[in-house]
Image (tube, helix red, strand yellow):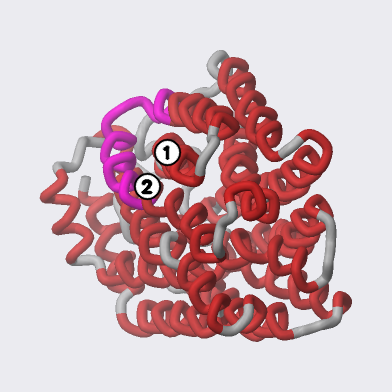
Amino acid sequence: MLWWIAFFNYADRQAIFSVFPLLEKEFHLSALQLGLLGSSFAWVYGLGAPFAGIVVDRVRRKAAILGGLQAWSLICMATALARSFPMLLFFRAAEGIGETFYFPASLSLISDYHARTTRSRALGFHQTSVYIGTIAGGFFAGLIAQSYGWRWSFVVFGGSGILLGLVLGRFLREPSRGAADFSAAAHARRIPIPEFVQILARTPTAWLLMLAFLCSNFVAVVLLSWMPKFLYDRFHLSLAAAGFTATVFVQLASMAGSPLGGWLADLLRRRTPSGRLIVQAIGVFGGAPFVVLCGLTASTAWLAFALIAWGLFKGLYDANIFASLFDVIRPEARGTAAGCMNMVGWLGGGGTAPIVIGYIAQRTNLGLAIAMAAAVYVVAGLLLITAILGHIRRDSQKMQAELEAR
């Protein structure tokens, strides 16, 4: 059930990028203004994430998940009412309000069904919904827009989400907090915000993971926001073909990489506390050269190969984004921690990527701007290595000792 909600979470946010060429023509937008459409969502999503995480740790997660679904679906439908760039920017930003509640709530809920021995695999499977949702949003938004105009893309996706929420309201269940973490379920308590801040300050692995997520999300949002237009301009594809091509190779490869990354991380985690981080480091370092190839190649065959390889390595990283964090954060604070992770990743990475790439593209070209994003992947890898070599063992042992003491 969560898989389908996450599907629409990403389909709704991806839809706008496939109709960039139509928005560019109708509203006479520059590359920088198109970038603002991508960044505005990320800014609201990121700013709201810590608040959403705090709320999630204090209310029923089912209510947060389904309430967020209904909210962002209604706003998605309302986007069709936009008649000017400021209105379009407003609705795009507002969609982040509803979506920001989903991942802190759902990931906290899943972590209470799965202990550390299976957590990466469970979250890796859930992550596959992101890839399919991205493909569907990219392709069907372009397909609908070609035949009926861009506004109907938002009506269809938003309306479908509303119907899904009504159906799942009867069936979605949640376990008690900490149910999978030894005796934590019997003693779960609300952690005050000052105490959470102290926990985070004393856990360097957590903030290194957040900074690495900032970098990796920057690169991911470059793909989501600019690749459809890149293909439309350079390879002269239709809207539907550009939206489909920009997503299908990467996302299907990530669908293979994410379960593989989850399985490998769970296996390595039994042998060393740094197991999940090692898999993540392989993902970002391995993906960097293929980001460069995507931006510089003029061959469709090499582009497809680069997108597939990028997607495979991206999946290795994605499967462990939150599973790695939960190895050093107690169950009662996981919603808040996930919210902080999203804030850092989306404000610092997702919020800057569309504008930075648009700015560079205006002064050079879009292909070169995309290729340059590979350097940010390398920074993510260096941050992960720092956590592996210096902090993860101590931080994970400290959390484990706290759980057993309770």
Residue at which label 2 appears: 44
Extent of the magenta region: 46-64
> Disc 1 vs disc 2: Cβ atoms closer than 8 Å?
yes
Q: Which of 241 and 248 is in front in this view?
A: 241
Q: Which of the two labelled residues, at mark 1 and mark 2, occupies the earlier sequence position?
A: 2
Residue at which label 1 appears: 94
Give how far across and how far down residue 86 sits, in percent.
Answer: 44, 44
Q: In this view, does 126 lie above or below 205?
A: above
Secondary structure of the residue carrying tag 2 is helix
Question: Residue shown at 58%/79% (left/top)?
Answer: 369
Q: Main secondary structure of the magenta part?
A: helix
Q: Residues within 10 Å of mark 1 (few under 14, many from 20)?
A: many
Q: Can residue 270 be seen in this view?
A: no
Residue 120: say if magenta. no
Secondary structure of the residue carrying tag 1 is helix
Residue 51: say if magenta. yes
Give how far across and how far down residue 370 sits, in percent.
Answer: 61, 77
- Numbered label attached to residue 131: none
103 vs 262, left or right, is left
Q: What residue type is labelled 1?
A: Ala
